[in-house]
Image (spheres, helix red, strand yellow):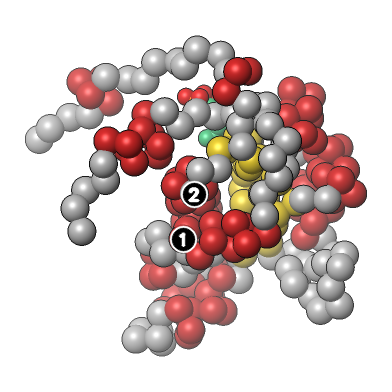
Amino acid sequence: MGPLSDEGLDLLFREARTYYAWTNQPIAEETLQRLYELSKWGPTSANASPARFVFVRSPQAKERLRPALTAGNVEKTMTAPVTVIVAYDLKFYEKLPKLFPHNPAMRDIFAKNPQLVESTAKRNSSLQGAYLMLAARALGLDCGPMSGFDNAKVDEEFFGTGQCEDCEEEFFPAGHVKSNFLCNLGYGDRAKLLPRSPRLEFSEACTLL
Ligand SMILES: Cc1cc2nc3c(=O)[nH]c(=O)nc-3n(C[C@H](O)[C@H](O)[C@H](O)COP(=O)(O)O)c2cc1C
């Protein structure tokens, strides 16, 4: 397998933008499943995979997000075909026997150290959110990540009761899933983009030792 073509690199990086306005093309449910199936392969520490993803699609579910959004993020979120809540499970270590079977001691290392749990969950769910964005771009979708929202409100609304609206079983048990950031997904409206802001040069951001 060789490196990606220039076209692939453009799609993932050079031509990919952060979108705030969307065409009305919807996202098929199978596309969201493909999105997860790709992004799940990104590496996380001890393969712990602490991120949990809530794909907010229906107008009713979007309304549950609205009160938590900063004013500038309301319109772009309400009009996006999907908004994903990138969250993390503070009890991610309960799945280590499945995810890290060759080292059974790992579960207890986390279970005994809440600080390590918190930093691992935050760091790795952020990475997993980035894998999700790159996977989305690889599938031809566009992204609009956002941290301008009230995490506590989202957590109370979506993770507080532990009861998923449409399902009978508990999906996200109360209290130990927390939001990290939101990301709008859809097919972006290029005509509404502002010019791209610059990035730091290699010499400003990198040192070779
Ligand atoms: C974690 C994160 C949080 C962000 N939060 C917001 C936000 O709350 N509202 C917003 O309009 N843009 C937000 N942005 C968008 C950034 O400003 C944008 O990605 C950046 O300027 C690069 O734009 P470009 O991809 O078009 O080059 C956020 C981006 C990231 C990665």
Point out the image quarter for the N terminus: bottom left
- The kind of secondary structure element at disc 2 is loop
**Image quadrant assignment for residue 52:** bottom right
Q: Residues within 10 Å of mark 2 (few under 14, many from 20)?
A: some
Instruction: Identify residue for label 1.
Output: 38
The label nearer to you, 2 versus 1, is 2
CA distance separating discs 2 and 1: 9 Å
Q: Closer to the camera, 134 or 53?
A: 134
> Does label 2 or label 1 sit earlier along the sequence?
1
Picture quarter with ligand 1: top right
Q: Residues within 10 Å of mark 1 (few under 14, many from 20)?
A: some
Q: Which residue is mark 2?
A: 139
Task: Give the residue displayed 41% in from the left and 80% down from the top.
Answer: 100
Q: Quadrant of residue 191?
A: top right
**Badge 2 amino acid:** Leu
| Horizontal side, residue 68 vs residue 21: left or right | right
Residue at the extreme left of the image, as rendered: 209
**The CB of the residue at mark 1 lies under 8 Å from ligand 1:** no
Q: Are marks 2 and 1 in contact (CB under 8 Å)?
A: yes
